[in-house]
Amino acid sequence: MKHLLIALIFPILFGTAPSTKVIADVEWNTDYETVLKRAKKQDKNILVYFTGSDWCGPCKMLKKDLFETSEFKEIAKNYELLYIDIPRNNDLLTPEQLKHNMDLMAKYNKKGVFPNLKILDSKGREKGALHGYSMNGDTQHHIKFLKKYTD
């Protein structure tokens, strides 16, 4: 219990936030440099997910319809995952994380489209993109897109 309390209080005292986000048992990293290093080391592509977690309806549906499926969980093993949130409620992120995310928006999501999936190689070069979600529950288009970059 003592260790749990320390783990919860430490980020508050020192202004750091966890560098991961768990969605449906899949761990997404929130730090670009960490993901890039891991991708290089493991020779994997990077899946970047741009979301507006507290306001984007299609993002919420994509999370439910795609990210919570066993098929996605299998595909995710082939990627390093990067979660970039641009919430309306800026209190959901530290100022540092918000700046980090906005910098990545300027680089990889210039049009500000949500949801937006980007595939990067291990050097940070864009290989593919898929944006939007029709909210009809048909995720096969997304699955095909993700599988395309796992070979």
Image (cartoon, rainbow, N blue to C red):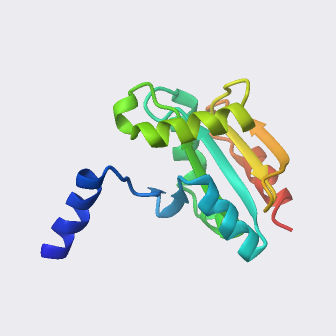
Residue at the image position 56 percent from the left and 54 percent from the top = 31
Residue 96 to residue 12: above or below:
above
Q: Quadrant of the C terminus?
A: bottom right
Residue 65: horizontal and vertical position, in percent? Answer: 57, 46
Q: How many marks?
A: 0
Residue 113 to residue 139: above or below:
above
| Among the 4 quarters of the image, the one containing residue 28 | bottom right
Residue reaching furthest to the front: 14
| Among the 4 quarters of the image, the one containing residue 121 | bottom right
Residue 63 to residue 8: above or below:
above
- From the viewer's side, name the closer residue of 6 and 117: 6
- From the viewer's side, name the closer residue of 41 and 137: 41
Is residue 72 in view? no
Residue 3: horizontal and vertical position, in percent? Answer: 19, 75
Q: Quadrant of the N terminus?
A: bottom left
Residue at the image position 13 percent from the left and 74 percent from the top = 2
Residue at the image position 29 percent from the left and 56 percent from the top = 11
| Among the 4 quarters of the image, the one containing residue 104 | top right
- From the viewer's side, name the closer residue of 137 and 90: 90
Residue reaching furthest to the left: 2
87 with respect to 142 (left or right):
left
Is residue 86 in view? yes
Residue 60: horizontal and vertical position, in percent? Answer: 50, 37
9 with respect to 64 (left or right):
left
- From the viewer's side, name the closer residue of 58 and 29: 29
